[in-house]
Image: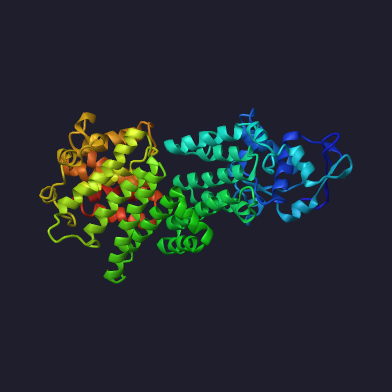
C-alpha cells in the first residue's frame, strides 16, 4: 500500500486525489476517520444502517466501500481485536463491524473544504452527525425536539421486556443504538448507552455490554450542572452493571469488590439509599454474591458460609421491598424467584438456621410458593421476557427431596418420588394457575413437553443454558414417569449436543447430574457426546 497522502476534498465536489469518489464509500471512510478523533475510536455497523436506512443491503454498501478503499490505497480494519493485521481479518465477518483506522492510515488523510483544511465540526456537518449539545434554552424548545429518540428508546425497552434477542435491525441493542444516534443532549445519550449495556448483559453478550459501558465513561466523568443529578444515578447503575458483568465472567470475588466500591462512593451510596430501583438492583446482586459465597466457597469455615447464607436471604428480602417501593412488578417477580430458589438451596445445604422441628417438605413447599408467585406475576402482568427459569427452578425443587445415588436402577429411582402436580397446586394456591390442570398439566412430563414445544416451534427461543437445564429436567422426569423409553433417550442426546456450547464448569455439572440416572440413560448421553 502506498504511504502517500490521501487528499479528500468535500466541496464543491467530492474528490480523492482529484478524482470523483462514490459518496457512500467516502462517507464510510470519513465516518471511521471522525470516530478515531472522538471518544469512540470504533465505528459500529449500525451507524451505517442508520445513515442509509433506505438501503436494505448494508453488506453491499460495505463491500463496495472496501473495493473503493483498496483502489484508494487505504486500510480500514474491522472487528474488536485491533491487534490483527488487516490482511489477516476474516472478510466473512466484515459487515458486522466495528470499523477502525490505525494511526498510520489516519495520518495519511488530509481533508479540505473549498481548498481549506476542514475542522472536525465541519466534517460532522458533512457526515450528518447529530451531536448532543446543551439543554435547550426554553421548555418549548425541548418539547419541539424531534421525538424519534423516544420512539426508538421505547421500542427497544419493549423488545427487552418481551425478551427478544438478536443483533439485526430489529434487535434490542440496535434500537438503543439508533436512539443514541438521535439523542439531543447528554442525558439522552447516556440513558440509551446504559440501557443498551443492561440489555446486552441480559442477552448474555457480556463483551458487548462491557463495550457499551466503556462508551458511557466520558459522560460520567464530565457531567455538567444541568445533568449532574441524572449522571449520579447513571454512575451508580453503571457500577452495578460492571459488578454484574464481573459476576458473570470473573466470579464472585471480583463482583464483591466492585459492589463494595460502589457503596464506598458517597455520591453513589446516596443514590442507592434514595432511589428504590437502583437500591433493588444493588440488593439483588449483593444477595446473589452472598449466595455464591455460601454455596461455592466450600473450603471456607462453616460459620462464614452460614453468615453469607443469612446475608443472602436478608438482602433478597430487602430487594423485594425495594422492588415494590419502586412500583417495578418485573423486579418483584425476579427477586421472588431468587428467594424461592435460594431458600431451598441454602436450607438443603444446611446453611440456614431453622427450628429443629422444621420439616423438609415445609421448606420445600414455601420455596415453591415463592417460585409460583414469580410465575403468577409473569402470567398476570406480561413480564419476565419469556424466560423459563421459573419452570426449571420449580422442577428442580419438586424433586429436590428425592434420594440421590450413582447409577440407580429404574426401580431404585422410583422409590423416592418427587412432589406431584396435585401436591404443588394444593400447596401454592392462589399462585398455582401457571402449573394447574387447567393448562392440561397432569404430570411434570406434560409441563416439560409443552415448554419444549414452545421452543422447538419457534414461538419462544431459549438460551443454550436455559435449554440445557430444561433438558436435564426432561431426562429425569421422563425417566421417572415414563420409564426408559424414547423421550428420555432423545432428551439425553439433545443435552449432549448442547454441552459443546457451554463452559467446562457447566459441562461438569450436567455430566455429574447424568450419573445419578440409570446406566442406559448415561450410555446414550455418552455416545452422543462422542459423535462428531
Marks counted in the figure total 0
Q: Seen from this angle, which residue lies furthest top?
A: 54
Q: Is residue 285 above or below residue 372?
A: below
Which is more toward the observer, 465 or 127? Answer: 127
Quarter of the view holding residue 217: bottom right
Residue under the point 34% across and 63% down: 293
Relative to 469, 47 lies left or right:
right
Q: Residue 505: image x %, image y %? A: 36, 58
Between 154 and 21, the one nearer to me in the picture = 154
Q: Which residue lies furthest to the right in this view?
A: 115
Counting from the top left corner in percent of width and height, residue 267 is at 53, 58
Location of residue 249 (image quadrant) = bottom left
Q: Position of residue 161 (x, y in %)?
A: 44, 38
- 416 on left or right of 236: left
Colour treatment of the image: rainbow
| Residue 31 in sight | yes
| Spot occupied by residue 461 in the image (x, y as percentages of width and height) | 39, 37
| Residue at horizontal 57 percent and vertical 34 percent from the top | 150
- 11 or 149: nearer the eye? 149
Q: Can residue 496 be seen in this view?
A: no
Amino acid at each position: 500500500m502506498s504511504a502517500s497522502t490521501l487528499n479528500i476534498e468535500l466541496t464543491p465536489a467530492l474528490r480523492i486525489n482529484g478524482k470523483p469518489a462514490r459518496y457512500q464509500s467516502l462517507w464510510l471512510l470519513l465516518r471511521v476517520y471522525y470516530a478515531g478523533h472522538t471518544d469512540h475510536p470504533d465505528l459500529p455497523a449500525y451507524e451505517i444502517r442508520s445513515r442509509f436506512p433506505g438501503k436494505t443491503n448494508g453488506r453491499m454498501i460495505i463491500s463496495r466501500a472496501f473495493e473503493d478503499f483498496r483502489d484508494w490505497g487505504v486500510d480500514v480494519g474491522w472487528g474488536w481485536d485491533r491487534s490483527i493485521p488487516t490482511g489477516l481479518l476474516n472478510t466473512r465477518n466484515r459487515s458486522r463491524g466495528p470499523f477502525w483506522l490505525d494511526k498510520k492510515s489516519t495520518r495519511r488523510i488530509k481533508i479540505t473544504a473549498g481548498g481549506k483544511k476542514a475542522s472536525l465540526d465541519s466534517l460532522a456537518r458533512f457526515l450528518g452527525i447529530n451531536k448532543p449539545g446543551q439543554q435547550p434554552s426554553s421548555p418549548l424548545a425541548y418539547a419541539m425536539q424531534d421525538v424519534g429518540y423516544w420512539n426508538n428508546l421505547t421500542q427497544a425497552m419493549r423488545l427487552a421486556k418481551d425478551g427478544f434477542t438478536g443483533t439485526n435491525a430489529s434487535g434490542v441493542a440496535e434500537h438503543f443504538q439508533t436512539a443514541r444516534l438521535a439523542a439531543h443532549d447528554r442525558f439522552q445519550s447516556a440513558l440509551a448507552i446504559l440501557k443498551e449495556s443492561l440489555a446486552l448483559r441480559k442477552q448474555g453478550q457480556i463483551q458487548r455490554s462491557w463495550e457499551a459501558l466503556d462508551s458511557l465513561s466520558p459522560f460520567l466523568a464530565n457531567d455538567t450542572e444541568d445533568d449532574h443529578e441524572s449522571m449520579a444515578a447513571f454512575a451508580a447503575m453503571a457500577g452495578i452493571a460492571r459488578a454484574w458483568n464481573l459476576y458473570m465472567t470473573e466470579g464472585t470475588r471480583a463482583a464483591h469488590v466492585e459492589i463494595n466500591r460502589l457503596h464506598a462512593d458517597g455520591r453513589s451510596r446516596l443514590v442507592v439509599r434514595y432511589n428504590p430501583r437502583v437500591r433493588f438492583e444493588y440488593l439483588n446482586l449483593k444477595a446473589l454474591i452472598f449466595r455464591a459465597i455460601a454455596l461455592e466457597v466450600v473450603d471456607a469455615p462453616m460459620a462464614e458460609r452460614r453468615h453469607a447464607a443469612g446475608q443472602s436471604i436478608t438482602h433478597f428480602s430487602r430487594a423485594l421491598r425495594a422492588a415494590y417501593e419502586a412500583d417495578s412488578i418485573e423486579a418483584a417477580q425476579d427477586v421472588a424467584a431468587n428467594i424461592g430458589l435460594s431458600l431451598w438451596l441454602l436450607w438443603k445445604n444446611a446453611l440456614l438456621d431453622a427450628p429443629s422441628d422444621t420439616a423438609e417438605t415445609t421448606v420445600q413447599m414455601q420455596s415453591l410458593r415463592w417460585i409460583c408467585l414469580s410465575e403468577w406475576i409473569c402470567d398476570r402482568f406480561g413480564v419476565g421476557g419469556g424466560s423459563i427459569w421459573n419452570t426449571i427452578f420449580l422442577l428442580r425443587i419438586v424433586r429436590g427431596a428425592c434420594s440421590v445415588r450413582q447409577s440407580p436402577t429404574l426401580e431404585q429411582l422410583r422409590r423416592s418420588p418427587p412432589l406431584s402436580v396435585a401436591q404443588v397446586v394444593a400447596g401454592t394456591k392462589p399462585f398455582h394457575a401457571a402449573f394447574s390442570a387447567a393448562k392440561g398439566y397432569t404430570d411434570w412430563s406434560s409441563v416439560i413437553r409443552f415448554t419444549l414445544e414452545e421452543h422447538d416451534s419457534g414461538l419462544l427461543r431459549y438460551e443454550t443454558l436455559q435449554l440445557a437445564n430444561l433438558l436435564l429436567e426432561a431426562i429425569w422426569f421422563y425417566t421417572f414417569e415414563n420409564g426408559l423409553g424414547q423421550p428420555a433417550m432423545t432428551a439425553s442426546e439433545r443435552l449432549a449436543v448442547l454441552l459443546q456450547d457451554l463452559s467446562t464448569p457447566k459441562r461438569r455439572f450436567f455430566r455429574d447430574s447424568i450419573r445419578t440416572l440409570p446406566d442406559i440413560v448415561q450410555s446414550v448421553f455418552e455416545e452422543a457426546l462422542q459423535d462428531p
